[in-house]
Amino acid sequence: MVSGVSPARAANVTLDFAQWWEPELPSGALRGLMDRFESENPGIKVNLLSAPYDNTREMAITGAATGTLADVVGLDGAWVFDFAKQEAIANLSALMKNAGYDDSELAAQVRVGGDTYMIPVVNFVYPIFINDELMEKAGVKEAPKTWSEFAEAAKKLAAIGSNVAGYCYTMNLENPTGIQNDVLSWVWSSGGKFIKDGRANLNTPEVKAVMTLMKDLYDAGAITPGINAMKEQDKIEEFVNGRLGIIVNTLAHINMIRDRNPDLKYSVAQTPVKDGFTGKAGMMYATWGAGISATTKNSAEAFKLVAFLMRSDVNKELAAFANALPGNKTSTPDFTNTDPLFEDGFKIFQNTYLENEFTGLPQANELQTSLSKQFQMMLAGDKTIDQMLADGEAEWNDMLERASR
């Protein structure tokens, strides 16, 4: 895929590559790819600085503040705005232009102020997971495709009894991603957005329709009890143990679910869309992203490494190692030794577009916490949906304005 990226110069250069990927990949997988890169680019060596995600994040924050980021750094999209504002990470749009790089095959790019600062290398998409046995017991014959079909299925699932619920929102405020994964992802599934020109746009018919759907399910008793205390892992546990019919979940958890409950019969499907919606559906994603230090003296060589990771054949191999979907749109994963559900997930991915409006936003966790509190008050009947959205939008815009100063 690399167009106009010339062979590396003969000078000896060592690139530090800081990431959390190596500990999560099969032993030797990332090092093997780096060895291949080095063989193709004589004169460039790669030093892997590997640590768990939390440690990598702490080191990246420190490095961004002190101007000591590694030459190439693994990034989470939630870090990008602040690092770009600090001028700690390089403008990749400029580096791509300088290299004559063709970015048409990239599945997504994370931009700040119109310029790219992070390239998603592999993507972890979030379709719905369905307990097939519970669906059969509930008399639901196929995966719901629309909101009305989903609501009907969730209520029928909850009617089974035996502590079974139809759906779940995880509203624990210590890790507030439930408002993103379980609620706002439904806005994206039907082509909606809630950020416009860098400002919150929550009080819209599209967002209100999602909130109305979620409130209806809650009032109907179709939602798992105790959601205000639940974290993401709690939701997965409920699903693994056969007490939850439908969840929004990442494909990265397929192997873990198989290990925890080999007898669980489940499937994956596209998140249902609003009745009458005919456009292309969006799908929430998380990513392993790559960025380049703004202070590196080896930006050209660093970009060669990023371009190598995004090359179709390499990207395909890395995605297979990670049980993820490629960041290169032309890379078709090798499903030979993977769970069949990965192939199902890839087909869904091909028919949707990737969306996560929190990627690149400042204070992403704080924004999610704020709306989670509003959502909880709405479910409890302390606020109407209109009040919740108006108050949530005001809070978000205040936070976004203060962050942009």
Image (cartoon, rainbow, N blue to C red):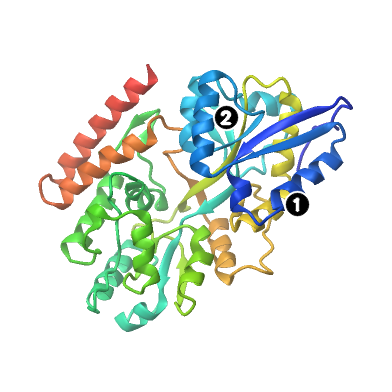
Q: Residue at x 50, y 31 (%)?
A: 80
Residue 249 in which image quadrant? bottom left
Amino acid type of the residue that numbered disc 1 sits on in the rendered structure: Asp
Q: Answer whether residue 89 is visible to the viewer in this image.
A: yes
The image quadrant where one finds the N terminus is top right
Residue 69 in which image quadrant? top right
Amino acid type of the residue that numbered disc 2 sits on in the rendered structure: Tyr
Q: Position of residue 67 (x, y in %)?
A: 57, 19
Q: Residue at x 40, y 29 (%)?
A: 362
Q: Residues within 10 Å of mark 1 (few under 14, many from 20)?
A: some
Q: Is residue 236 left or right of residue 5?
A: left
Q: Position of residue 292 (x, y in %)?
A: 63, 29
Q: Which residue is mark 1?
A: 313
Residue 6 vs residue 352, the one in the foreground? 6
Q: Is residue 261 left or right of residue 15?
A: left
Residue 195 vs residue 20, the one in the foreground? 20
Residue 340 in which image quadrant? bottom right
Residue 321 vs residue 94, the one in the foreground? 321
Q: Residue at x 12, y 44 (%)?
A: 383
Q: Which residue is mark 2?
A: 117
Distance (Cα) linking label 2 and label 1: 23 Å
How many numbered marks have been drawn onto this rendered protein structure? 2
Residue 66 vs residue 90, the one in the foreground? 66
Q: Position of residue 152 (x, y in %)?
A: 27, 70
Q: Is residue 73 left or right of residue 356?
A: right
